[in-house]
Image: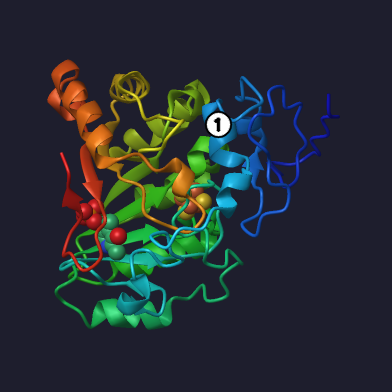
Amino acid sequence: MMKQHFPQGSCIKFPSFPQKNPIEEIWENPAFSWNIPVSLIHKIQTYDFSDPIFAQFVPSIKEKIKDKNFSTDPLNEKTFMHGQLIHKYHNRALLLCTKTCAMHCRFCFRKNMSFSPCNNSHFSHELNYIENNESLSEIILSGGDPLTLKDDIFKNLLDNLSSIAHIKTIRIHTRMPIGFPNRISQQFLETLRACKKQLFFILHTNHVQELDNEIFNALKKIQMLGIPLLTQSVLLKGINHSFLDLKNLYSLLIEHGIIPYYLHQLDKAEGTKHFAVSINDGTKIMKKLSEELPGYAVPKYVQDICGKKNKTILC
Ligand SMILES: *Cc1c(COP(=O)(O)O)cnc(C)c1O
Ligand code: SF4
């Protein structure tokens, strides 16, 4: 058995695991580095790729598989960039507020962009663009993870966006509370409470094993502010690609008043082919979910297709 040496701190860069069943090999030194929150390491139940946490965060040598359909910019986002703002859809645009992520999911479609800290924290170019585009009514804060921004930078950004009259809603897309529920601090909650525009909070979560009461308690504080809480997930082979996995996930979420928004078909980013599930299989799972769950507990199954004006609904 390998020695377990988890250093102090919140994230592990190069853990070594007591991998019990090494059918599939760990890739020790991938370009998209290891980054696993300690709280998630503690939720691993079996130290191999059959475990939904292990498989999401531990690099596999399968990431080295090349396929011409899996590219470094699968959504052709470069074409729609104005600084760090992606304006692809009609009345909403997505701001890559940072390139930093609190955890590195191995299936991430942005894994091939450099995840270095972002220097531009004033967003002056992007704010200027938004101000001059009255067709925009919503800004989506994404990244990287917007919650990795320092509180003062995050607050400044919300204040600046809120001062633009034609922006009516601001959406925050994050996965950070899954690894770091204590990010939902009093100061952060105060920033959300003070925001003059309607906020929406979209949590990225893929499996019940990621979730616990500490996370739900933190999220409840956001819900108490009157901010709708929704989720998005990615359909991932070997992690949640079964009726039961998703039924359990969505049942638990609605128990806590959280509405499943999107289930994403995997974006074809280089190094993620081993996570792909066919649309045919995805559709079958969705049909069964619709039969067994309340309508509001079933997300839209969507795919991001290059050149389309919105996400394509598969089911
Ligand atoms: C997904 C996405 C959005 C938001 O789309 P919704 O369907 O409104 O959730 C906006 N901009 C970009 C570039 C996106 O990828
Ligand atoms: S949290 Fe989101 S952006 Fe960050 S690595 Fe995971 S999937 Fe990618």
Quarter of the image for the N terminus: give it: top right
Residue 156 visible to the viewer: yes
Depth check: give the residue in front, 222 or 107: 107
At a point 72% along the width and 53% down the height, the residue shown is 29
Place of residue 219 in the rendered image (x, y in percent of width and height, measured from the top left): 41, 33
Tell me if mark 1 has few (under 14), some (14-19) or many (20+) residues whose alpha carbon lies within 10 angstroms of its own. Answer: many
- Where is mark 1, residue-wise? 53
At a point 66% along the width and 48% down the height, the residue shown is 34
At a point 32% along the width and 68% down the height, the residue shown is 161
Residue 4 located left or right of residue 151: right
Place of residue 39 in the rendered image (x, y in percent of width and height, measured from the top left): 63, 31
Rendered image quadrant of residue 203:
top left
Place of residue 242 in the rendered image (x, y in percent of width and height, measured from the top left): 34, 24
Quarter of the image for the C terminus: give it: top left
At a point 23% along the width and 37% down the height, the residue shown is 280
Place of residue 293 in the rendered image (x, y in percent of width and height, measured from the top left): 19, 19
Residue 246 located left or right of residue 238: left
Above or below residue 119? Residue 201 is above
Residue 131 located left or right of residue 218: left
